[in-house]
Amino acid sequence: MNEERIALIVDDEPGHRMMVRAVLEDDGWTVLEAESGERALTVLAEEAESDTYPDVAMVDMKMPGMDGMQLLKELQVRRPSMPVVLLTAFGSVGSAVDAMKRGAFDYLTKPADNDELTAVLGKAFEYHKLLDENARLRAEVGSEPDFIGASPGIELVRNLVGQAGPTEATVLILGPSGTGKELVAEGLHKASLRADKPLIKVNCAALPDDLLESELFGYEKGAFTGAVKDKPGRFQLADGGTLFLDEIGEMPAPLQAKLLRALQEKTVEPLGSVRTVQVDTRIIAATNRNLKKEVEAGRFREDLYYRLAVLEIRIPPLCERKEDLPLLVSFLLRRLGNKNNKIIRTVTPAFLDALSGYDWPGNVRELENVLERALILSRSDALGPDLLPPQITGARENVIDMEFNHVGRPAPTPANLEEAEKQAIIQALEENGNHRERTAEALGISRRTLQYKLKKYGLTRR
């Protein structure tokens, strides 16, 4: 059974509205019409009373009274999850591009090509569904969830934390830097029966070997130069609670042996002391290394590995769960907005598209830095791709692969670059039956960029 799709067409030209209605109804849409911006707001209010709303709005830029830009602003306030596609004359494309920076989903030039019309509105509908699903998930997980996302990898992490949290099992958290291993450790502690006791954290990579030992096990007065009084170690501070050993793979071999003994006997021996101290501490460890390979290479004790890895929780890198990007972006922007006293109400589809095209070697930590940069640089309450750094947008700035590998041509020189680009587009059009959507995909560019190139090279009649 096909799901209902409702489009609101706002255009002061009856003939164009009639054409758009015919095309969309043939494609299975339910179509609402308005001849002005003012009438469009009335239609929205009427539909709200019957508890139905348009999924997508198509708005003419030039209308008497309230024009397309003014209506876009109103719709963003009244129906922020409803994508708005703008209709513009070719000579006004610059205004449409500016509108996209302000949050419009896309634009079409009049008269709209039928294939482009159905393709763009179809994508807008999918985007609308995604925003609604994100809102539903945010409501389910609450205002400050532990793990952001609904991908299979994050669902598995969430389930394992829920199962392992209430136990006393030692847990080993695996994942690249920046994926949120510390967040998982906090989730395990909060889900445990030790939640009212301390969670003590130690970064094993951040401390020199001798200092790490004294930090973990403590020392007595006179144990070494500068030890002017007794100091309890992190094991003792975490007594009754949880000790989180981050970057456990960086721990030197002599200290691994002492840690193994502490885990087995639940006792520690402070530096300079001949006595042992009983401790009741749950251990959670994390690493971005492959500890099995470290064991094989002789750099990590096998017995300690099996003592730590009673349960392993692997956090997938961001490149493996890009479907979580909209949720992550929404959550992080809300938190960063509070931090920087700045509200970002929306991001453009092109912004999300650019984020999805990047592999995120720095994972969620890198995403947070990129979003904070964009938020700070933004002069409006909407984020567009122009606010992203070059490492994310750089691959997209060269809108067609300059080596034209997709058509088997050698790299052109600057002198014949435009001609080579034109010929590449012509060949791609021929190979795809002049279908613009498939041609854009074959070239690795957006439909909007293809439309611009077709007009630039006089190919619009093909």
Image (tube, rainbow, N blue to C red):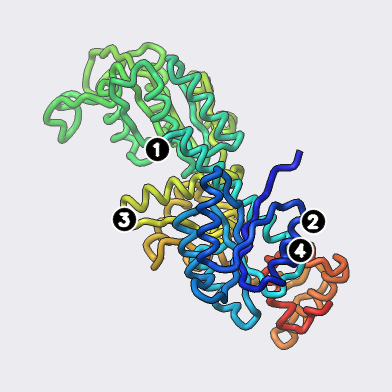
Mark 3 touches mark 4? (CB < 8 Å): no
Q: Give the tally of numbered discs.
A: 4
Dot 3 or dot 4, earlier in sequence? 3
Q: Residue 143: give its label.
A: 1
Q: Residue at x 50, y 42 (%)?
A: 135
Mark 1 touches mark 2? (CB < 8 Å): no
Looking at numbered disc 4 in the image, what kind of residue is underneath it?
Answer: Glu
Foreground of the two, 415 or 454: 454
Dot 2 or dot 3, earlier in sequence? 2
Mark 3 nearby-residue class (10 Å; few <14, some 14–19, many ≥20)? few
Q: CA distance from mark 2 to mark 3?
A: 48 Å
Foreground of the two, 83 or 157: 83
Badge 1 element: loop
Foreground of the two, 120 or 309: 120
Residue 302 coordinates in the image, percent (x, y): 53, 23
Residue at far left of view: 228
* In-image side of 230 versus 35 (left or right): left
Q: Residue at x 71, y 77 (%)?
A: 453
Dot 1 or dot 4, earlier in sequence? 1
Q: Residue 420: give its label.
A: none
Q: Residue 26: give its label.
A: 2
Residue 402 coordinates in the image, percent (x, y): 71, 73
Q: Is residue 358 above or below residue 73?
A: above
Residue beneath disc 4: 437
Dot 4 or dot 2, earlier in sequence? 2
Dot 3 or dot 1, earlier in sequence? 1
Badge 4 element: helix
Q: CA distance from mark 1 to mark 4?
A: 39 Å
Looking at numbered disc 3 in the image, what kind of residue is underneath it?
Answer: Asn
Residue beneath disc 3: 340
Looking at numbered disc 2 in the image, what kind of residue is underneath it?
Answer: Asp
